[in-house]
Amino acid sequence: MLVAPQDWRPQGVDDLEPRAWDALRETAQSVCVTAGAGAGKTEFLAQKAAYLLQTGICPEPKRILAISFKRDAAQNLAARVRQRCPADQARRFHSMTFDAFTKRMLDHFRRAIPDSYRPPADYSIASPSRQDIELFLRRHGRPDVSADRFERAVARTPLPIEETVENPRVRDLLRTYWDDQYAMPGGALVSFAMINRLVEYMVHTNPRIKRALRLTYPFVFLDEFQDTTYAQYNLVNAVFTGSESVFTAVGDDKQKIMGWAGAMDNAFDEFTVDFNAVRHALLRNWRSHKALVAVQHVIAQRIDPEVEEVEARGELAVEGDTAAIWRFDSRKQEAKQIARWIRSEVDHGRIAPHDVAILVRMRANDVEDELAPVLRAHGLTLRNLARNVGEIAIQDLLAEPLSEVLLPLFRLGARGRDPDAWNATQERLQTLAGTSPEDEAGQERLQREIGEFSRNLRQTMCDKPPDPAVADQLFAQVIDFARVERLRRAYPEYRRDADFQRVRNGFQVLLRECVENAADWSGVFDRFEGKGQVPLMTIHKSKGLEFHTMIFFGLDAHTWWSLSPNRGEELNSFFVAFTRAVQRAFFAYCSERGNAIDWLEQLLLPAGVEQIHGADIVAPDA
C-alpha cells in the first residue's frame, strides 16, 4: 500500500537530521549531498529509496539505479533497502558498482557494439599492471611514452578512436593496443576502463538502448561520488543528460582516494552545473563519539581548512584511551604487545576478536607472516582479508552474491533453529525463483522446499564431521539446490562462465580451508565469515566498513613514506581509514622499522591523542 508523501516516515530509524529531510524530499530536481564520515549516507540513500518507492513517486514498474564505488557499499545499500521496504518494492532497487553496471550492459548488449570494437563473448577481465603497459609500449617501439599517461589515454579516449583522436601517432598506438588486447593468445583481455568506453560507444550508436535506460531508471543514486572518474562521468552524461531522470549524488571531497585512477578534480562542482543540482551538507556523525570526532576534525582541517565542524552523535562506551600512539622499541615487542593487548581485551569481555581491525598501508601478506604466529601463540587467529583464495580476495568473496545466497543455506544445515538464516534464505531464493510475495502458493512451495532441503543437509552434517571431502559434498548439494542457471540468470555478473567459476572456486577453496581442525559445522561457517578472528586489511579496503577498535600497524616514515601533507590523496586515505573507528583508534609505531612521522604526531598530539610506550599498553600480568 502506498503512503502519501506528507505522511511518510523514516523506516527503521527514529528520525533524520533536518538537512537530510530536505535532500530526501527533493525529487523534482537533482541533489548533491555532501556527507562526511559517519554521516549515515548509506542510511540516507536507503531512506530516500524507501520514500520514492513507498509513496509511488517512483511507480511500478520503474526502477531506482544506485551506483556505488565498492562492492561492499553496493551490497550494504541493497541490504538496507530490503530491510526498509517490502520485497516487491525492494526488487525495484538495483544497487551495483559502476564496474558491475557497465559489465552488465556489455554482456547484455554486446552485439549492439559495432563490429570493429565488439569484444568476443568469451573475453576475460584484465587489470593491466604498469609492467604490462610498458611491455606493450616497448614492443611497439614507443618506450618514450609514459605508461601512466598512456593508461589514462586508454581510459579517457572515446570510441571510435579513428574519429575522436586527431594525432595520427597517438591514434595508431591506441588502436593497436585495443587490437592487441583482443588478440591475446589466451583469449581477449578487456579492462574495466575499456568496458566503460565500449558501453559509452554502444549508447551513442544505439538510441534505443539509451531510451530504455532512461525509461527504466527515473531516479539514479551516485554513491561515493568524489571518486567518480572522468570516463565514468562521461558515460553518465552520455546516458542521462537531457533526460528527465533525477540524480542524488552523495560523497565527500575529504574522502577522495582514487585520484590515481582518474577521479575527477571537482566532481561536485561539475555535477552541480551539469545537472542543475541543489546542494546539501549533512553535519552529524552517527558512528563516532565526541573525542574521536574531535581528532577527525583536526585531520579534516588539514585537508580542507574551511570544513564545517561536525556534531558527534556516537556514544562513548569504553573507559581509558580512545586514541593513542603506541611506540615500540622493536618489531618483536610490537607484535607481542599488540597480541597481548587484544588477548586482554577479549578476556575481559570488552571486545570480540573480530571487533579489532589491524590496518596496513600495503603488503598485507607480509604483515600476516609477521603477526599471525604471534597472535596464534596467544590463542588468536589473524584473518588476512587481502589474501586470495583461488583468484579472488577473501574480502571480495564475502561480498559476492554467491556468498549471500549459499551461506544462509549452510547455516540452516549447521543449526537446528536459525531465524535469520531462514529469512535470508527465503528472501534470496524468492529472488532466484522469481516468486512474488503475493503468490501464496509459490511461497508455501518455496518454504516446503527449503524445509526439506535444510533437514537433509542437517542430517548429513550430523552424520559426518567437518572434513574437506565432506565439505565438497555439501557444497555440491547446496549449489545444486540454489541452481547454477538461476544464479547466473539472477546476477548478471555471473552470466559469463569465467566470472562465475572464479567466485565459485574461491568459495570452495575457502570452505575447504575452514574445515581444518574445526570442531563442528557451525564453527566452520563462523570461520568462513571471520567470526572470532582479528581482521587484517589495507587502509583502502577499510572504506565503507566500521570497527569498534582499529590499530594502524607500522605507522612509521619508512612504511608509510607517501603519507605527507603535500600528498592529498594519501592523507585522504588515512582520514577515511581513521573515520572507520567507532570507539578507539591506535597508531602502532616501531623505531626498529623506521622513524616517526613527525608532522603527523604534531597534528595528533594537541588534539588529545596520547603517546604511550608499547611496554605499558597492557599490564605485565594480563
Image (cartoon, rainbow, N blue to C red):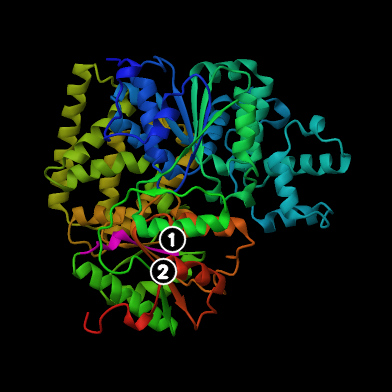
Q: Quick one: quadrant of the C terminus? A: bottom left
Residue, disc 2: 609
Residue 249 shows in the view: yes
Task: Indicate the amino acid at tag 2.
Answer: Val
Q: Give the range drawn in magenta.
A: 350-359
Where is residue 175? Give x, y as percent. 78, 39
Q: Residues within 10 Å of mark 1 (few under 14, many from 20)?
A: many
Q: Nearer the viewer, residue 268 or 557?
A: 268
Circle 2 residues within 10 Å: few <14, some 14–19, many ≥20:
many
Q: In the picture provided, is 428 more to the left or to the right than 246?
A: left
In front: 589, or 421?
Answer: 589
Tell me the residue at 33%/41% (across/down): 404
In what element is the residue under mark 1? helix
Q: In which quarter of the image is residue 244?
A: top right
The residue type indicated by label 1 comes to Val
- Whether residue 386 appears in this view of the structure is no
Whether residue 362 is situated above or below residue 443 in the rendered picture = below
Disc assigned to residue 295 = 1
Helix, strand or loop at label 2? It is loop
Percent position of residue 406, x then y: 30, 41
Q: Which residue is drawn at 82% across and 35% down?
A: 165
Question: Which numbered disc, 1 or 2, marks the residue that appears first in the sequence?
Answer: 1
Left or right: 66 with respect to 304?
Answer: left
Q: How many labels does the image show?
A: 2
Is 142 situated above or below 447?
below
Label 1 with label 2: CB-CB less than 8 Å: yes
Q: Does the magenta stretch include residue 6?
A: no
